Image: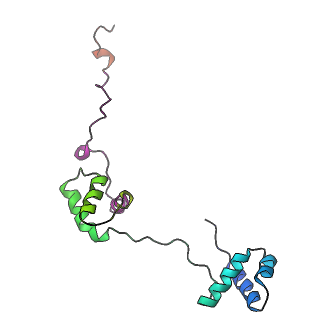
Amino acid sequence: MARPYSLDLRERAVRRVAAGESCRKVASLFEISVASVVKWSQRKRQTGSAAAKPIGGSRRRTLVAEREWLLKRIAEKPDLTLRAIVAELTERGVVASYGTVWNFFAAENISFKKNPARRRAGPARRGAKARTVEEVPGSA
């Protein structure tokens, strides 16, 4: 993402507009867009500063209220899938997506790796495991 223009440039442009120059003339003088000059002037009038708004920020975690229940549920049944947890949350009246549940458990340092508690069956198409050459009858 691009960085915002410097506060110095913004203030110089806003000062010229406040002194009576047109936004178009100020924009061409500083080689910036007319829309930027207009927005900066509006922001200066509304807030008293032409400074850029903060970029980004933190997102609030939506499952914090359900933390105890989620941790207890995983302790009770460790082979639950994330999709099953989403379904159970929906039954409880909590709106949550797969990604939200994933992010919650990632923040709690709980992973869903394949281990004995979460062993999955192989795909139906896969036949028996290939035997070694020594096990094949009639091999030389």
- Left or right: 111 as drawn, with respect to 34: left
Q: Position of residue 43 (x, y in %)?
A: 62, 85
Q: Residue at x 73, y 74 (%)?
A: 33
> Residue 22: horizontal and vertical position, in percent?
78, 85
Camera-nearest residue between 110 and 36: 36
Q: Is residue 128 magenta?
A: yes
Residue 84 place in picture, x, y as percent: 27, 53
Q: Which residues are magenta?
A: 101-130
Give residue 65's quadrant in the image: bottom left
> Magenta part mainly helix, strand or loop?
loop
- Residue 69 is situated, as x and y percent measured from the top left of the image, at 22, 65
Image vertical order of residue 74 relative to residue 115, above or below = below
Residue at the image point whose x is 75% and y is 87% from the top: 17
Reply above or below: 132 against 25: above
Magenta region includes residue 103: yes
Residue 89's place in the image compared with 123, above or below, is below
As drawn, is 34 to the left or to the right of 49?
right
Q: Residue at x 70, y 85 (%)?
A: 11
- Location of the C terminus by quadrant is top left
- Which quadrant holds the N terminus? bottom right
Q: Residue at x 79, y 87 (%)?
A: 21
* Quadrant in which residue 16 is drawn: bottom right
Q: Is residue 48 left or right of residue 111?
A: right
